Image (spheres, grey):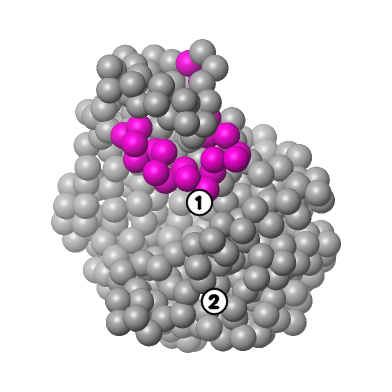
Amino acid sequence: MGVYVHFPWCLRKCPYCDFASLPAERREIPHDAYARAVVAELARRAEVLGEHRLESVFFGGGTPSLWHADALGSVLAAITRTFEPAAELEVTVECNPSSLDYESARALADRGVNRFSIGVQSLDAERLAFLGRLHDVESGLRALRDALASGVPRVSADLIFGVHGQSPDDAAREARIVTELGVEHVSAYALTIEPSTEFGRRAKQRSLPLLSDELVADSFVAVDEALGQLGFEHYEISNYARPGARSRHNVGYWTGRPYLGLGSAAFGTVTLPSGRVRYRNTPNVERYLAAHDSGEPLFEPGQLVSEVELIDAKTALAERIMLGLRLAEGLDLDAVGQELGVDPWTRELSAAVERLCARGRLARQGGVLAIPKSAWLFADGTIAELL
């Protein structure tokens, strides 16, 4: 099992971000109270879930690097006391350059963090301003250097490509620069316009400058070629790693591993005696803080939980296809069907697989399906047609 801990505060909401986050100054955040609430939720959920081997812990947000190291460390210590850690437990903290330096990185490392995921996003001043980032180019590079110098063994850099004014060569150059510093993992995402964001509203008003689809596609290819030449494995549509440096936590999502979600707005997907359940905690931080000692139901809508979904075998199969096909190796549909107790090869799915293979959008070897790298640009459409 993996554990995801959501930290809902950030210094400022970025105009493209649709994650659950609240702008706040660091001194305004209830660091210790929030840690106590998360630990209390953990204790209650663990009573229901029983024993599990802990494969990964991921602190996401928001900006978890704003959380005082002692408070974050107390949550991590409670998690590793509650579940038996794997021999190579991966513990990731998402960081923004505006809240990470050598001292803070060292403090997190001292408390058991062994992987940083740093939101560099761009190495161009104009694009950073367009994206609403608080850091400048040098701060982004300095955060990577400080993280690498802190002794944390694994560092990942996030980049956004497909931004207005950026050429494919620009995108490839930025990817090369961060890897030359020594990071072993890169997440490269095309700018996505979500309706509920400031960019979404501007796009609806036709006031947001956007890159053409052709240039976005060319940038995807340019980043792939640049990182491939440097020995990085393009193991998932948006993710690259040196050998052995994949994000174990995210691979857990893509391969259907259960994960416990803790904190305000956190999602979790776990297996109970009644079956597989997905839940989301309330995104209202005040309500979350008040609920931790109120005996609120853990898997029913109430003050603590805002959404609950029972996941039947058909839904689970669709999700495994949707997520598994993002991986370069695809998924073994026969094995997934056996695991879920269903026959995945319905007449409709078999026909769709045949059509997509004939068009080069999908490859099949026995029961294993994969999207060829040459067709990754069309992955969303391929998966939609399958489902």
Q: Residues within 10 Å of mark 1 (few under 14, many from 20)?
A: some
**Front residue (pair 235, 58):** 235
In magenta stretch: residue 370 = yes
Q: Position of residue 139 (x, y in %)?
A: 71, 81
**Front residue (pair 166, 159):** 166
Q: Residue at x 44, y 64 (%)?
A: 192
Q: Position of residue 45 (x, y in %)?
A: 34, 44
Task: Kindly identify which numbered label has been placed on residue 292.
Answer: none
Q: If the image is split into quadrants, where does the C terminus sit?
A: top left
What segment is highlighted magenta in the picture? 367-387
Name which of mark 1 and mark 2 comes first in the sequence.
1
- The residue where tag 1 is placed is 78
Q: Residues within 10 Å of mark 2 (few under 14, many from 20)?
A: some
Above or below — where is 271 with respect to 176?
A: above
Q: Residue at x 39, y 72 (%)?
A: 21
| Mark whose residue sits in front, 1 or 2 | 2
> Label 1 to label 2, Cα distance in Å?
44 Å
The kind of residue on which mark 1 rests is Ala
Instruction: Give the left or right position of residue 111, taking residue 38 as reference.
Output: right
As helix, strand or loop, the secondary structure at mark 2 comes to loop
Above or below — where is 387 with respect to 34?
A: above
